Amino acid sequence: MLLRASGEQTGTEYDLNAVTNDTGDAGVEHESLLRELTEAAIRNRWDDLEDVRARAMQAMGEQETVDALTVAAAFNGITRVADATGIPLDEQTAATTVEMRDVTGIDRFDYAQKSARYSTADGSW
Amino acid sequence: MTLRYPDDLPLRDDLREGHAAAWADIAQPGVSWTGAERVAILAEARAALDCELCNARISALSPNAVQGVHDAASALPAAVVDGIHRLRTDPQRLTRAWFDSLVEDQLSLAAYAELVSLVCTSVIIDTQHNVLGLPVAPLPDPVDGEPSGDVLDDTVDIGAWLPVMKAEADLTDTGLPSVPNIARAMSLVPRAAALFFGAFRPHYRLQQIPFAISQAQTEFIASRVSALNECFY
């Protein structure tokens, strides 16, 4: 959702479906490398990460690569905070992103929906 | 044990300082947990990555379909170990029913909030080491002392699993409130929120990010992590 806001500030339109999907082109510079870096980091694929990190440093630069990985590390933590606390979207964000969440499929990650999906039939766990 | 990144890495000073401060804070007695228990929670979070039960659950259609005993690294109660391992390895499938059961029988809300903060802070710091090809930092040496019990009294229910601090609904020019819900998620225990965001803040800004990558690239990475972790927020 913040990628959309970032695009609005720069007059750039990004394909948000490509963000939630594992393939596609959202329109962000060095997107393919950023996608590879992020996936290797979050999936704990350290051998893959070593390779893509070397390629990213060559194509983007060392500082850019480290900064990209620094962002990924942070969101690996904060997504767990959200998951572990069932925190709802901010009211304004929820109201202005109804269509976008539907189109991109983000709604399937809603905590009430996930709780229903992953709980046992008798409500136990 | 002090946390220190190699000097030759291009990391900003505020990140180095934020992580070192978090590591030192983790060793101190907390609000519901002693220093030794807080460090044990971190050890357990790391052990989860090699836990056979966790790996079997990740592969299963539902985590509840697989029962067993975790490969524990501490003497923490079994339900606490289970909570830590789930949060570390399979957070997207945590459920309200699981949470309710845990806080009904095993943990106070404050102890849970503190545990979430500890695990998630360690995830940030351990991931930062992992992605740079560094070994994870040695765990800090726990400091003796009793938990403080300091929790926020004036809270509100916003539909989250935990009660949170009250906050104004005023919006900033990012379109987000000045205090977004995620910043309030662990606010029942102010020190838990401070620990986590002290480690998180040097990694991200909503605007004018002081990095060599653009704001759009930053949001793309953040969004991809959210999608990979199936995080709604």
Image (cartoon, grey):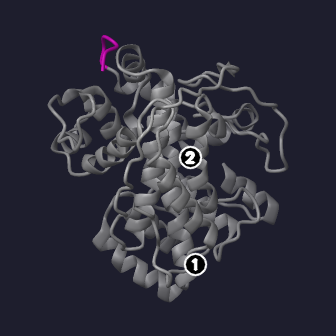
Alpha carbons under labels 1 and 2: distance apart: 27 Å
Numbered label tally: 2
Q: Which residues are magenta?
A: A120-125
Q: Nearer the viewer, residue B209 or B147?
A: B147
Q: Residue A116: horizontal and vertical position, in percent?
A: 41, 22
Q: Amino acid at mark 1?
A: Glu
The 10 Å Cα crowd at callout 1, few under 14, some 14 to 19, many 20 or more, is some
Q: Nearer the viewer, residue A33 or B28?
A: B28
Q: With B24 as the anchor, is A28 left or right in this view?
A: right
Instruction: Tell me which residue sits at (79%, 45%) in the image.
Output: B175
Q: Residue A106: horizontal and vertical position, in percent?
A: 54, 41
Could you say whether the residue bearing mark 2 is in a helix, strand or loop?
helix
Residue marked by disc 1: A64
Q: Which mark is residue B195?
A: 2
Q: Name the chain under label 1.
A: A
Q: Amino acid at mark 2?
A: Leu
